Amino acid sequence: MPQVETQLVAEAGDIELAAPTKRREDVIRRSVLAALGRPDRLLKVAVLPLWGNNFRVNVWTATDGAGNGIPNSYFVTADERGGIVRSEPPIQKLY
């Protein structure tokens, strides 16, 4: 029985940590779009946590034809609140 209680506490802790992480990713997403501009036929901006304060940001758009594409992709370092500290390649206004 103690194992079950420990597991439930860990799951509750994971839920509490998920909300700030999601907010941080939302700030990164908005910051990338603000700097880049909004591409035509934008589908989504995926913010993928890597390690520490590092993220991969992929901008997905619909393409002519049957598929979707990633015309812009960045390796981003962000602060605790989601502010972009560094981006490789640098984000330039394209749209």
Image (tube, rainbow, N blue to C red):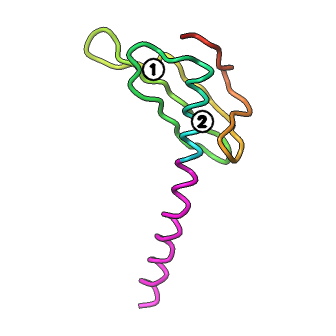
- Give the tally of numbered discs: 2
User: Magenta part mainly helix, strand or loop?
Assistant: helix
Q: Kindly identify which residue carries mark 1.
A: 70
Front-most of residues 33 and 73: 33
Q: Amino acid at mark 1?
A: Ile
Q: Kindly identify which residue carries mark 2.
A: 28
Residue 23, percent from left and from top: 55, 47
Front-most of residues 50 and 47: 47
In the depicted structure, whether residue 61 falls above or below residue 54: above
Q: Amino acid at mark 2?
A: Ile
Residue under the point 56% across and 42% down: 25
- Which element carries disc 1, helix, strand or loop? strand
Residue under the point 53% across and 69% down: 13
* Residue 61 highlighted magenta (yes or no): no
Q: Which residues are magenta?
A: 1-22
Closer mark to the observer between disc 2 and disc 1? 2
Which image quadrant: the C terminus?
A: top right
Residue under the point 42% across and 83% down: 4
Q: Is residue 60 left or right of residue 37?
A: left
